[in-house]
Amino acid sequence: MPGNTQTRIVNSYMDYTGIVAEDPVQLHISSSFFLGDAFIVLKSINGVAKGVYIVDNLFSGKNNGVEIVKLDQSNGAFKQIDKVFVDRNTVQGMNTRATIARASMQGNGTWTVDFSSILLFPNLIKHVQYSFSASGSSFPNHALRNVSENRVVIESDVAVPATVFVTVDQGVTS
């Protein structure tokens, strides 16, 4: 029944076969091996994804551009997203998708870090944490200016060579 899956798939071997979970609630997939571009689909029927953990799996593909986790929102977008955690998967020959992403970027006054190629849900960042490391002896004021379309913009009040380290999360409860 959509919305009440309460399913655990642990230590499984998915040989050229994927998983489709409709409105997943309490879905846990871990320590499994997905061979031959096998992937996981989260399908929206009523727009619910709660308590979904897809962690510590191995994915092996044939470099065909297949994502390890896909969204099927043909029946409507996911509207209730809570505690969805896709992270720590090992991927070879497929495209990584996650709900947590980390990046660093060097710049000089404005830094735009784009996480859209890795984050699972479009235009959804619930939490941002960043650190700022300026070169030289100056340390300007800096601030998080914008979070939209899975991009983070950080600005300083003066141009200064610096590196920003950013971590974003889509699955933290509001």
Image: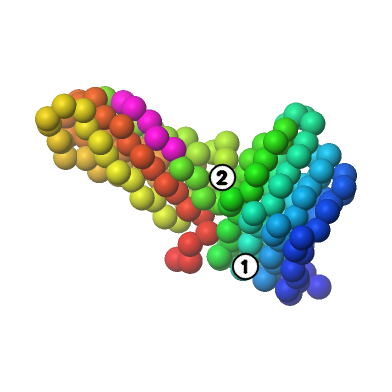
Q: Where residue 156 sits in the image (x, y, percent)?
A: 22, 35
Vertical relation: 88 (above or below) 21 = above
Q: Is residue 117 magenta?
A: no
Identity of the amino acid at label 2?
Answer: Leu
**Distance of mark 2 from mark 1, alpha carbons?**
17 Å
Q: Which residue is mark 1?
A: 50
Vertical relation: 37 (above or below) 135 = below
The image's colour scheme reads: rainbow
Q: Where residue 28 sits in the image (x, y, percent)?
A: 69, 65
Q: Secondary structure at mark 1?
A: strand
**Dot placed on the residue nearer the N-terminal end, 2 or 1:** 1
Q: Foreground residue, 80 or 133?
A: 133
Q: Quadrant of the C terminus?
A: bottom left
Q: Secondary structure at mark 2?
A: loop
Vertical relation: 137 (above or below) 142 = above
Q: Where residue 121 sits in the image (x, y, percent)?
A: 59, 49
Identity of the amino acid at label 1?
Answer: Lys
Q: Which residue is mark 2?
A: 119
